[in-house]
Amino acid sequence: MRLHLLLLLALCGTGTTAAALSYSLRGNWSICNGNGSLELPGAVPGCVHSALFQQGLIQDSYYRFNDLNYRWISLDNWTYSKEFKIPFEISKWQKVNLILEGVDTISKILFNEVTIGETDNMFNRYEQCSFSWDWGPSFPTQGIWKDVRIEAYNICHLTDFTFSPIYDKSAQAWNLEIEATFDVVSSKPVGGQVIVAIPKLQTQQMYNLELQPGKRIVELFLNISKNITVETWWPHGHGNQTGYNMTILFELDGGLNIEKSAKVYFRTVELIEEPIKGSPGLSFYFKINGFPVFLKGSNWIPADSFQDRVTSELLRLLLQSVVDANMNTLRVWGGGIYEQDEFYELCDELGIMVWQDFMFACALYPTDQGFLDSVRAEVAYQIKRLKSHPSIIIWSGNNENEEALMMNWYHISITDRPIYIKDYVTLYVKNIRELVLAGDKSRPFITSSPTNGAETVAEGWVSQNPNSNYFGDVHFYDYISDCWNWKVFPRARFASEYGYQSWPSFSTLEKVSSTEDWSFSSKFSLHRQHHEGGNKQMLYQAGLHFKLPESTDPLRTFKDTIYLTQVMQAQCVKTETEFYRRSRSEIVDQQGHTMGALYWQLNDIWQAPSWASLEYGGKWKMLHYFAQNFFAPLLPVGFENENTFYIYGVSDLHSDYSMTLTVRVHTWSSLEPVCSCVTEHLVMKGGEAVRLYEEPVSELLRRCGNCTRESCVVSFYLSADHELLSPTNYHFLSSLKEALGLCKAQITAIISQQGDIFVFDLETSAVAPFVWLDVGSIPGRFSDNGFLMTEKTRTILFYPWEPTSKSELEQSFHVTSLTDIY
């Protein structure tokens, strides 16, 4: 790709003098292909695909097979050109820079026909997922995807500004390390003073400084009195996300004033790796502000193949859905991109902790000096850009590269392995780790994910088994074993990847397909599935516990199959996540103390089957509604072991709670419970998982009259003083394809409106599992969905994301339960 900038007039005097001037070149540019046969206008920021679409030259790139049809776009060379006038006189400025914030990716830059630069990274590693992954298409984009501007200044200019709050344990006081980088273009030293103020902390300090010509770094150390109460930043569900406004004023010689403002958050983070009684290995968990926090959440991938489509509104919608589902963590996965500033600002605001990978994934990388220089520039830039965000709690060197090397994914001969290990250590330890330790002392660093953490270090930076249950974090996928059997899951210290696939809703697929595509075996369905054997794996896993759709209507069968894959995914991830949550406080067979569950993956990059719980555009799958429950701060978890039924209570709270546990048993054929029991008052310890209830299944069935495993289902919840403290959870005593007494439920809804919220009053004629409420393409979410309905009536709320009406909802509303496909 070439960027061709033509300066028509360099002179247009303004008659004023300022510290600096900035002139944006965003907006309309001209784009042409390699041989000049195609020329069109295009927006900057943007990319070639978007420009072609906006001019009507191509369809939606995600429609049907267009990821194949439009490969020619990525295989061609493209030139971006712009003619412009600079609205100030260049000769009055000591330095004038052309700033390109993001160029995708290999380009030559010409200014008035003179080559002035080239890019091959621009701190944006070749986005691996642009070339496809098992959940996304191949769209290697080209374009100027961030801002372009001309910047002019005299004397000196503030080029970078960052800071880190540090807690001094010995002094029991907060300090702030501030780093400001200047480009001093004056031929003489520039003197002056700096005033740093945080008004709400009654803090103001003044410093004298003298800047020598050239690039200069100013380091300031701000002390905050221990007598001042500093409110800390907490993850969602653990406290407030308090921040403080800070101003920094540089008053320099020549009347030059440079002012910077920022939001400062105070928090500490520690990665605890220490021996555990009764278990070999080491713990792996995070303390935030000294409190052990179980990390609940998912893995983030780029929200679109085309970054110019990722709006502020979309980011807020997706991240709000994270906290609405009781999550507190996202892992920014190493095969995508370093996200834009607004992403991290929103995570700060919402209390979402970020596990930040550097952008290296599932590959062996070179270590020639040119590549290392590029990586060092990338890493140093990202550390400086991001380290002020309290949401980022850990840096990770790569995704799965230690495991790939040591488990020999790439069939490296045993004699060559030392060479690859040396290259691995060179890149991730001697370069990336070195830069992190030098540039950011406020959070931990691990070389990879999965990794054995401190054990990996002890073994020379690569472990014999990087996916060990006794150290660090694990990635776990198993599509063959029965996902209802919790014993197949690893009792690991931390599960940072796991999951199951499902298809997105029909209303999402309908926008990018045609009628001939609406079959599970269509060419479209096979093409859209990028995970080998994925469609068969979904049906196999669903078939273990559910009857597969057999309608004579092909469209009905397709819709029912989509629904069933979402049921399967939600139930599988529920079972696995609840296992990890209840394993936080116990050691069984020398394993346990699990302190994190981040399923793969949160969001979709296009409309296709994937592991996501949010469809492309943000619609909640059944899994996301389930996550809202299985990540609840107080949760009863039911499971069986050796024919005994257990209920554990899981708490993420900071204090103990007194409560009771209610256990009910229903037959599938009746909306009235056949038996119910309430425990005596229990004290649920804060930050623990404890056994609350156990009973042999045979005794439970005998006590409840005529129950059998196939005819009954168990539900349970925590309450205090008749107030519900947890979601109502359930346990199936048999596969639902073997359920007896389950009959087709007639479910009706009366819709009313209360302000901006819509109320759905539901009534059912029979017990209904996995009740799914759908309003098609109307954007919004329900208060609950995919639920087990064991009572005749239930009220559900709908929160629209855009203005809508009651009549639109009534026309679009459809309800499905498992009984509809049996």
Image (cartoon, rainbow, N blue to C red):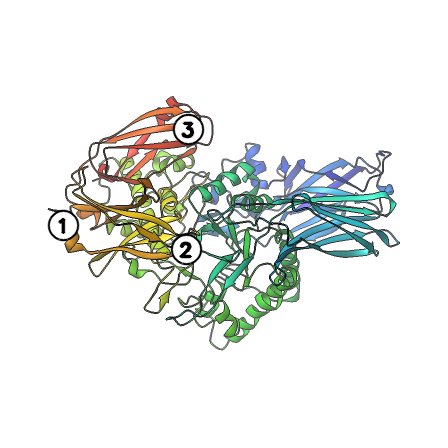
Q: Which residue is mark 2?
A: 687
Question: Which residue: 29% across, 45% down?
Answer: 717
Q: Which residue is mark 1?
A: 703
Q: Secondary structure at mark 2?
A: loop
Residue 706 left/right relative to 331: left
Give how far across and how far down residue 130 sits, in percent. Answer: 52, 49
Give how far across and how far down residue 115 sits, in percent. Answer: 75, 50
C-alpha span from label 3 to label 1:
43 Å
Q: Secondary structure at mark 3?
A: strand
808 w.r.t. 273: above or below? above
Q: Which residue is mark 3?
A: 757
Please tell me which of labels 1 and 2 falls first in the chain: 2
291 w.r.t. 566: above or below? below
Residue 325 left/right relative to 372: left
Question: Which residue: 46% across, 32% down?
Answer: 801
The quarter in which the C terminus is drawn is top left
Give how far across and how far down residue 44 sits, in percent. Answer: 64, 39
Looking at this view, name the residue that lies furthest to the front. 227
What type is the residue that disc 2 sits on?
A: Gly
Residue 126 visible somewhere in the drawing: yes
Pointer 3: residues within 10 angstroms few (<14), some, or many (20+)? some
Q: Secondary structure at mark 1?
A: helix
